[in-house]
Image (cartoon, grey):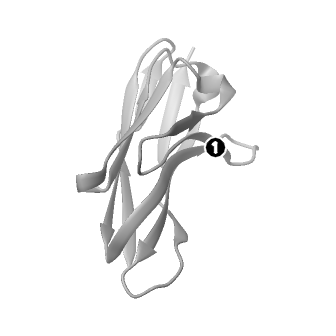
Amino acid sequence: QVQLVESGGGLVQAGGSLRLSCAASGSIYSINVMGWYRQAPGKQRELVAGITSGGRTNYADSVKGRFTISRDNAKNTVYLQMNSLKPEDTGVYYCNANLLNWGMSRPGNNWGQGTQVTVSS
């Protein structure tokens, strides 16, 4: 069984910064892609940023130049540094990891419980 535990959300004023962390634990053999998604009230969950095990990254257009995703493979942890935050960045941020469990032949997607980010104007 795998757990993804997020931390770092909170309330911040527009223009401020937050850093999210997500640590994966359990019977993990390998982790392929890790990423962050967010869901605003009344909207669908959307990809914010992703990073491969080799460090290749991709970002939603709305966060390019403001957010930076990184990971520590030794700690099975992914981070999201969010700068110049805007009210439209408000939402619940979810960690996602595509990983292979010990004893399994195919990787699967795993989700964290979500952490609230609120940006006030």
Q: Position of residue 118 (x, y in %)?
A: 52, 31
Look at the numbered disc 1 and give the secondary structure of its residue: strand
For disc 1, the neighbor class at 10 Å (few under 14, some 14 to 19, many from 20) is some
Q: Residue at x 68, y 48 (%)?
A: 45
Q: Position of residue 1 (x, y in %)?
A: 38, 80
In the figure, is residue 69 to the left or right of 47? left
In the figure, is residue 57 to the left or right of 23? right
Q: Answer above or below: position of 51 versus 15.
A: below
Q: Position of residue 84 (x, y in %)?
A: 49, 14
Q: Nearer the viewer, residue 100 or 77?
A: 100
Q: Residue at x 57, y 36 (%)?
A: 58
Q: Nearer the viewer, residue 114 or 4?
A: 4
Q: Residue at x 47, y 59 (%)?
A: 32
Q: Answer above or below: position of 73 versus 11.
A: below
Q: Answer above or below: position of 15 versus 35.
A: above
Q: Nearer the viewer, residue 70 or 86?
A: 70
* Quadrant of the rendered image containing residue 83: top left
Look at label 1 and name its amino acid.
Leu
Residue under label 1: 47
In the figure, is residue 60 to the left or right of 97? right
| Extreme-left residue of the structure | 74
